[in-house]
């Protein structure tokens, strides 16, 4: 079982989507995809006159911003990804965490202040996801999800990917981004442990949107996911062929 989190910063690139779809089409099994869409959502927010604000890579989400997030993630980003996959012969389904109650969340409490309608996953309905996989589909999840009391939340896609991988007991979780891995002075770090991750965050080497990725990777390892890799598309292609690629997050 493989879970792949696709960086939203690449979803506006037809070339990237075409190449990603080719890689997915040739994987030996059916993966679960979780996608972001922050760059496109920010562009949509700007066109609508809605200000975007972030705390450690997490979008502060008021009522107005939540509407934009749903339009950007569940609408445009999901459709672009699924279209590319279906065009490549992959039986992809565009879903969100809301569909069939796949992902349940609660409000995220953050040391940086109130983030508004931002949630964190607390449960994944792995049985329903597994049923889709066994039926031959490739689920593609937008990270918008609901709470137990029926409220809608914006959720960081890295957090959803980590929760889905843990819930499914995935053998591997790949964070697919636009860089070849975690970088220090421009060089890829091939291997990191959770304490090393926290030290690099404190030093400022790991910052912005990479912070939720590496922390989600550490949580996934703690929840029993065997391997977590942060890499780009070329790295995913290499990793799928058993070649070393990206930054591997491992237990101590």
Image: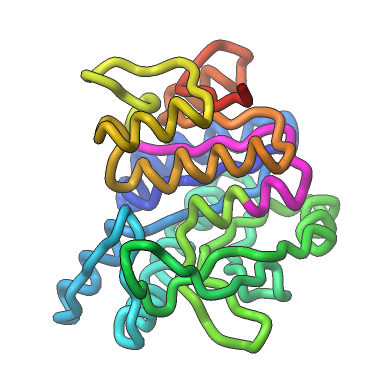
Which residue sits at x=43%, y=48%? 212
- Where residue 174 appears, x then y in whole percent? 56, 35
Say which quadrant the N terminus sits in: top right
- Where residue 41 appears, x then y in whole percent? 30, 66
68 relative to 232, above or below: below
Residue at the farthest top position: 243
Which residue sits at x=29%, y=15%? 187
Q: In terms of image quadrants, where is residue 57?
A: bottom left
Tell whether position 125 is magenta: no
Q: Which residue occupies the foreground of this view, 117 or 230?
A: 117
**What segment is highlighted magenta in the picture?**
163-177
Q: In terms of image quadrants, where is residue 53?
A: bottom left
- Where residue 131 appears, x then y in whole percent? 84, 58
Q: Is residue 77 left or right of residue 164?
A: left
60 relative to 33, above or below: below
Q: Is residue 1 left or right of residue 162?
A: right
Q: Which residue occupies the foreground of this view, 6 or 28?
A: 6
- Where residue 151 appears, x then y in whole percent? 56, 86
180 relative to 31, above or below: above
Indicate how the structure is coloured in the image: rainbow
62 relative to 217, above or below: below
Tell whether position 176 is magenta: yes
Q: Is residue 109 left or right of residue 93?
A: left
Say which quadrant the C terminus sits in: top right
Which residue sits at x=48%, y=65%? 155
Q: Is residue 164 left or right of residue 77?
A: right
């Amino acid at each position: 079982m493989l879970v792949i989190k696709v960086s939203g910063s690449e979803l506006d690139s037809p070339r990237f989507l075409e190449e990603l779809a080719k890689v997915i089409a040739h994987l030996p099994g059916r993966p679960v995809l979780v996608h972001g869409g922050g760059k496109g959502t920010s562009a949509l927010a700007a066109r609508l006159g809605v200000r975007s604000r972030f705390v450690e890579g997490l979008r502060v989400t008021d009522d107005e911003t939540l509407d934009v997030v749903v339009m950007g993630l569940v609408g445009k980003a999901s459709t672009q990804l699924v279209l590319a996959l279906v065009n490549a012969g992959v039986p992809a389904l565009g879903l969100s965490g809301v569909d069939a109650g796949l992902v349940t969340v609660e409000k995220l409490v953050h040391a940086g202040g109130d983030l508004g309608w931002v949630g964190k996953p607390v449960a994944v309905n792995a049985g329903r996801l597994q049923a889709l996989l066994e039926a031959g589909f490739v689920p593609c999840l937008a990270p918008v999800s609901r709470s137990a009391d029926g409220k809608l939340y914006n959720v960081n896609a890295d957090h959803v990917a980590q929760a889905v991988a843990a819930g499914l007991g995935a053998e591997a979780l790949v964070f697919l981004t636009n860089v070849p891995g975690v970088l220090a002075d421009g060089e890829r770090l091939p291997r990191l442990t959770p304490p090393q991750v926290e030290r690099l965050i404190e030093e400022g080497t790991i910052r912005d949107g990479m912070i939720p990725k590496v922390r989600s990777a550490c949580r996934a390892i703690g929840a029993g996911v065997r391997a977590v890799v942060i890499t780009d598309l070329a790295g995913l292609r290499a990793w799928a062929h058993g070649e070393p690629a990206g930054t591997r997050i491992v237990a101590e």
